[in-house]
Image: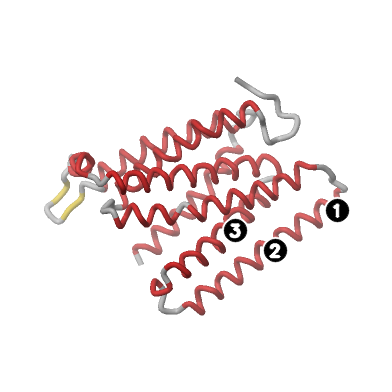
Amino acid sequence: SVAFLMLFITMISWGSWPTVFKKCGNWRFEASYFDYVWSSIVWSLLLASILGGVSPNGWLPLQFLNSLPGLSMTGIFFATFAGVVSGFGNILLVNAINLIGFAVAFPLAIGTSLILGTTLAYITNPTATSHPQFLFLGLVFVTLAVIVDGLAYQFKEKNAKIKGSPFKRGIIVSVIGGILISLSGFPFNFAFKAGLNGYQGLLFLSIGAFLAAVILLPMLMKKPLVPQQKPIG
């Protein structure tokens, strides 16, 4: 029940941040995304220091910070690598939202991520669920939702007589972003096996997402995926 509540809050938050990005007006997404990734590190550190210090013996504010020097380098590597992969996927998702809009890009990317990620997770660890029939029934509904979303987009494109590469590019970027997001879970699992807990993993995941932005965003600033968008320094 606690995990379900956390998932519910997560999905509200995940579905809200692109909407907040759209409220930024004429801001280039690169500027907004840089703010997003560095603030993620700050909030990860802040929340981990507060919530990660809670124990049966009371609240120990320095418990999380004191645990960092003794962490496994293997765990740190995998958590950071997971952040880089998911960061690349998120950056492509925001680009796709710029290209074809939130209503099409987000379901395509997240639907692809759910389908691929869940299937791969089941193949690599089938004992994680005792009722695979319900798991794959849910995936069937997700797949149908993605298909219907794509058909609705085609219907809109046809009736509006919209032609050109931005829309096809947006579909491709959405799917690639979803694939990358789905693949980020596997290195994260290795980080847990190496001894990291959720708060420690989250901090290094955020650091990895920042590194992804440092690597990929300058390229997109020079060679924007959005047509007719001017390169910036």
87 or 52: nearer the viewer:
87
Q: Position of residue 11 (x, y in %)?
A: 49, 55
Task: For the N terminus, give its image quadrant.
Answer: bottom left
> Residue 69 appears in which quarter of the rendering?
top left
Q: SS for tag 2?
A: helix
Toward the top, the furthest residue is 233
> Residue 28 appears in which quarter of the rendering?
top right
Toward the left, the furthest residue is 57
Q: Is residue 182 left or right of residue 74?
A: right
Q: Position of residue 184 (x, y in %)?
A: 47, 52
Please give the label number shown on residue 72: none
Residue pointed to by mark 2: 147
Query: Gap between marks 3 and 1, in whole Å?
Result: 24 Å
Residue pictured at 51% horizontal, 61% vertical: 117
Q: Position of residue 46 (x, y in %)?
A: 31, 39
Q: Position of residue 104 (x, y in %)?
A: 68, 52
Query: How many other residues sit within 10 Å of disc 3, few (<14), some (14-19) or many (≥20)?
Result: many
Residue pictured at 31% horizontal, 55% vertical: 192
| Amino acid on which the number 1 mark rests in the picture | Lys
| Amino acid on which the number 3 mark rests in the picture | Thr
Residue pointed to by mark 1: 158
138 or 219: nearer the viewer:
219
Which of discs 3 and 1 lies nearer the camera? The answer is: 3
Residue pointed to by mark 3: 112
| Amino acid on which the number 2 mark rests in the picture | Ile
Q: Is residue 41 left or right of residue 233?
A: left
Task: For the C terminus, give its image quadrant.
Answer: top right
